[in-house]
Image (cartoon, helix red, strand yellow):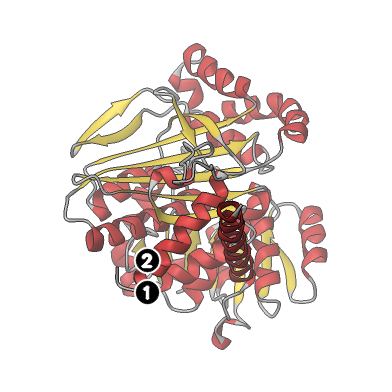
Amino acid sequence: MMASLGMYSWTTGIKKRVFVRVANLAKENEKRVEIAEKVKNSKVVILGGTGRVGGSTAIALSKLCPDLNIVIAGRNREKGASMVSKLGKNAEFAEVNINDREALEANLTDADIVVHAAGPFQQSENCKVLEAAIGTKTAYLDICDDTSYATRAKSYMNKALEANIPAITTGGIYPGVSNVMAAELVRTAKLESEGELERLRFYYYTAGTGGAGPTILATSFLLLGEDVIAYNKGEKIKLTPYSGMLSIDFGMGIGKKDVYLLNLPEVKSVHEVLGVPTVSARFGTDPFFWNWGMIAMRNLLPQEFLRDRSKVQQLVQLFDPVVRAVDGTAGEAVSMRVDLECSDGHNRIGIFSHKRLSKSVGISTAAFVLAILEGSTKPGVWFPEEPEGIAVEAREVLLQRASEGTINFILNKAPWMVETNPKELGVECGTKMHPHLLYILVQSLRFECLYTAC
């Protein structure tokens, strides 16, 4: 009887500590980082502001900083007016074609930053928005997810330095936030591990199109026309797109999902910037038959077809009604998992999951906008993982802002700590603990050990 009373007391104590820990975590997640005073009246021009991603970014910015002056730039005046009505008195619409250099420069003349969200970026032949930003000395951010475009943007480094403007390419959610997560995993590993960096892998999952609409659909089709560039022990290798399937555990709220190789810019940039010898990126979607459809398209359609933007847009128009119908039942959850392995067995991961990609992508992009406006980016053209792109000391703030509303955000944890169905560990008395309870208990003990130097 005394033993059971002791066990009751022990478990009750654990529960109290767990509830306190959960409450504290919830409070921490609700905290918002204060925005610097100098940023509050800035003028932000969002190209592609009438689209899903650009519009989401505008909404996120207006909520984070209501005093910002936001210009929704696009080609559709009706959609622009609709978006402006959602943003309030500090918003306006400007009719702009991104291929019209004069119109671009006219709208950037008195802007503090321009956000290029007018994708898709695949098979784009120029960087006219970046050129206009340099010409008007306007800070620049794009949400590019194409390796060739990102490489071309980096070639403007000297011009951006001469103009003294900060610019980030591949900023957004993925790539973007995922790059910063990778940079933090590598930075921490260099402090904690005695081994060498061995392998870093990006895993991405989106339910349906994630509510991002035709743009993400076009991007996915265009990526099927590109050979996958990955790195194996320092050697650059070419792989077949949407091959090499792996079943990856994205943790609570998402679970295990099948993901496939894709050619994404963060692979090249992380390999070169962070010095990881083996790097790859995979992506998967739901329902499962969309993955089968992607494989079928890769096998049935010639690469030349999948590299033709006009033909791909025709495909998008054909599939869009079906995709929208399925999106209604599939939801729009998004998850990113970044894995880092070191030669001494020091393996750490980061996970970022949100129930709505259409909302999260805007919040993530807004976090980059604020970081640039606050002075966290040096003059030049940078990737997010470069310390000149997002200063090391500014990464925590960026990740805190970007992770607002996430259902799961962790960084620098051992892989076993985030598994959806981890093996249950029994205590000496033979009882078993719920996996989530065990995880929080281990975290609490870990923090206590740090404070007591054990």
Q: Is residue 374 toward the left or the right of residue 404 in the image?
A: left
- 253 horizontally vs 154: left or right: right
Q: Nearer the viewer, residue 86 or 113?
A: 86
**Residue with the most extreme top position:** 300
Find residue 95 and report its image quarter.
bottom right
Could you tell which of marks 1 and 2 lies nearer the N-terminus? Answer: 2
Residue identifier under label 1: 451
Q: Is mark 2 on a helix, strand or loop?
A: loop
Residue 349 image position (x, y, % from top left): 39, 48
Discs 1/2, front: 1
Residue pictured at 77% horizontal, 68% vertical: 87
Residue 65 position within the rendered picture, expressed as x and y whole percent measured from the top left: 66, 76
- The answer to whether residue 104 is seen in the rendering is no
The reply to whether residue 157 is in sight is yes
x, y percent for residue 201: 36, 41
- Could you say which is closer to the camera, residue 53 or residue 158? 53
State which quarter of the image contains the C terminus: bottom left
What type is the residue that disc 2 sits on? Gly
